[in-house]
Image (tube, rainbow, N blue to C red):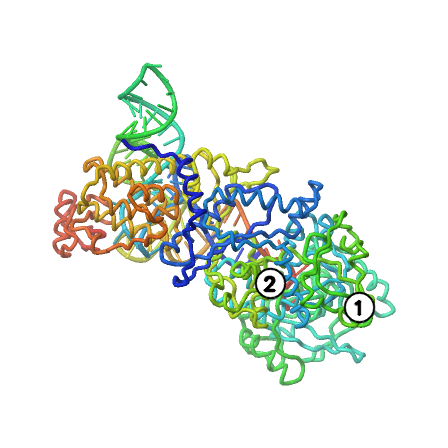
Amino acid sequence: MSAPYNHKAIEQKWRSNWQENPVNVNDGKKPKYYCLDMFPYPSGNGLHVGHWRGYVISDVWSRYKMLKGYYVIHPMGWDAFGLPAENYAIKMGVHPAKSTAENVANIKKQIGDISAIYDWDMEVNTTDPAFYKWTQWIFVKMFKEGLAYEKEFPINWCPSCKTGLANEEVVNGCCERCGAEVTKKNLRQWMLKITKYAERLLADLDKLDWPEKVKKMQSDWIGKSYGAEVDFAVDGRDEKITVYTTRPDTLYGATFMVLAPEHALAAGLATPETKEAVDQYIYDASMKSNVDRLQDKEKTGVFTGSYAVNPLNQAKIPIWLSDYVLADYGTGAIMCVPAHDDRDFAFAKKFDIPIIQVIAKDGKEIEDMTEAYTEASGIMINSGEWNGMESAVLKKEAPHMMEKRGLGKATVNYKLRDWVFSRQRYWGEPIPIVHCPKCGNVPVPEEELPLQLPDVESYEPTGTGESPLAAIDAWVNCKCPACGADAKRETNTMPQWAGSSWYFLRYVDNHNSEELVSKEKAHKYLPVDMYIGGVEHAVLHLLYSRFYTKFLYDIGAVDFEEPFHKLFNQGMITGKNGIKMSKSKGNVVAPDDLVRDYGCDSLRMYELFVGPPELDAEWDDRGIDGVSRFLKRFWKLALDSQEANVAATPEMIKLRHKLIYDITQRLESFSLNTVISGFMEYNNKFMEIAKKAGGVDKETMESFLILLAPFAPHVAEELWEIYGHDASIFTSAWPEADESAMKDDEIEVPVQINGKTRAVIRIAADISKEDAIAAGKEAVADKLTGNIVKEIYVPKKIINIVQK
RNA sequence: GCCGCUGUGGCGGAAUUGGCAGACGCACACGACUCAAAAUCGUGCGGGAAACCAUAUGGGUUCGACUCCCAUCAGCGGCACCA
């Protein structure tokens, strides 16, 4: 008689057992494998089944690597500074330090239900002064290297979160966090010069084993383009205006020029007649929000009254101002070729500016142009000495030709902008800078770090552009570290991304008070081999982390340039009809009840069984019955087999090796959903065998247990013990399939006539082509007309007879 | 508008990468056990009476197409005046 599967008892038993005797230990001999989860921010809502999925995937992978002989670094921590934590605290009316600590405790307990092999000795928390000391230290280093600088300009401002935002945090003109429409606000800001790393961030994408989608998003975001800067003289003045263009081949077709309203020369180009209109336009543009500017596709503009001179043919072209030209890209000024650019075309049509075609389309000049011809392909026309050249060739050569003649130069531009790094909020790392009237900006000396975030009563954002810290005189007023004069502290804090940009380096040396991470440990345990998390951070956290790592490499703090070798993005778990789980929609499925009713092992397996791990999946509670039934049947098979104690038959041995082969293959290709269905399928086959033989041999069952262990660790461990082992199943080695033992002597092969299956025959696996076809023909003899055109035998796959 | 991904039974999905489409599950139906129900076990389960027809739609390549090519449609995601 076998005892029924009782998930509660065995899960409780092994959870405490593993706590006392950790299964993942560093013996100093095993190679390391670093498998990392994107660490969560401690939300008050707790975990739902969607969070589980990512953690289960990473734990299965970690346990698999463990069984493959690695010491697996699998840590967990808390991204606890920043807007989500602070907004939650404000809503609940408690201090963020308090609510954050509570939420961490709660989520940590929930994560415990997963029974993952997290090494809690490595835990980090971005709000811990011992941690953010190093977040601040990095900032000071960047400041000293000239990568952190102050600038006043109209930044993205979220009126609801009452803080400035980075470009990456603005999605469709709205705040990435709260969805409020982002406006502009002129503010003094700390910036990080991420643009200095644009080229390396782009080039090194090639080295990464990341989803193509994410690499593409990053390279699009960095947005490299090749072109030329061309100097245009202003007619009748000494000034010149430099424009940036990616289409220098069309230079003869330029019929006007447009400057961004914010361009330094914009106002000065006005004549007495146009001054009023020009000033008005510049003012209006400055008042427009990003959203207005984006939504209004209808072109607006004003003529300055001045003309620019085309350096090639000395043609005078009018200079306009328009807000479709961005001030902070290229030179903030463009030459406009309406014949070959959609935007210029729309502008020219609206303001009745001439259009000159300079590339023949299909070998012709178009009579009445109704749209721009934007392809760089065709023969040059109306272009002086360039006539007759191929546009694509000229596009590449023109910048160098201009350079030789001193009219311009070849340039490269990036869409990537510097990173707006200060936040006018309380809950973040204070920026460790002192403003001294004599010395200017002076960093807090490294030995005085961390600069602690002061405890305050009122931490709500002010909305004035000042941080709440600005109200604490005792904190703000200080002495200059350089000269000792009265000075004031910087009161802005860092964005949430500051801590998360480097936290993964800290896990392996989280108690080090002398260094961010020791050189020795960094070399030994870093970087991350596998990083698992959602795709939503493609151009945020994942870009910032790469930037930080490259910087730390440059100053010699680490000896690698890329933080994450392999990246896996798991799909989102949604509610019915693909609707994102959220409290407000009321469609959140919490794991707690499912763990109670079905057990951790069942939920772990179901999280994987719902679908391919990289795709989104709609959650349906009912499906969990399937994996639960599987575990019960497997449990019974294992116990029955132990009791029956049968000797291995050739059939069992063959099936065992096929099982090992299939599961390993699917696991290696990260097809985790089919690993689960594979378990079920093989379990069904073994149950059939057991019906006749009374059970399955010990070696086969033990192999099955090891394969199952990463997925259903408690069941596997308990049965392993019942099978008489003292040591944990996780000290075993992953079984190897012997392919020669998998071979079938006889195989089933379909016989087709004209590609349609008419019969299935059993033949010897090593049969000759002639014999196979003969056997096939015999099986479908009644359907053959005798008019055979072709006979095909693909060994072990198919026989196809083609007849007329 | 541009770029990318996806489209297979009532549902989630599988198909060794061009070789028997629908594995494995869910749901459902019937049967066994039970006084009964649950649980469990067994059988069936794309459509069609059949020939056959079926992998979003239309074409193509091939002995053979869910898989490759061309066009179209639908859904999701990214970017969006970056000159």
Where residue A313 appears, as percent x and y from the top left, is 68, 80
Does residue B11 sit above or below A432 in this rendering? above
- The picture quadrant where one finds residue A88 is top right
Q: Which quarter of the figure is the N terminus of chain A placed in?
A: top left
Q: Which label is found at residue A513?
A: 2
On what subunit does the disc labeled 2 rest? A
Judged from the image, the secondary structure of the residue bearing numbered disc 2 is loop
Comparing A379 with A781, the one in front is A781
> Residue at 66% across / 57% down in the picture?
A495
Left or right of residue A11, residue A484 in this image: right
Q: Earlier in the sequence, mark 2 or mark 1?
A: 1
- Can you see residue A753? no
Q: Which residue is mark 1?
A: A436
How crowded is the residue under tag 1: few (<14 C-alpha within 10 Å), some, or many (20+)? many
Left or right of residue A144, residue A641 in this image: left
- The picture quadrant where one finds residue A272 is bottom right
> Residue at 49% across / 55% down in the picture?
A36
Judged from the image, the secondary structure of the residue bearing numbered disc 1 is strand
**Residue at mark 2 to residue at mark 1: CA–CA distance:** 29 Å
Does residue A202 sit above or below B67 in this rendering? below
Q: Which label is found at residue A150?
A: none
Comparing A93 with A586, the one in front is A93
> Residue at 65% across / 57% down in the picture?
A129
Labels 2 and 1 positioned on one and the same chain: yes
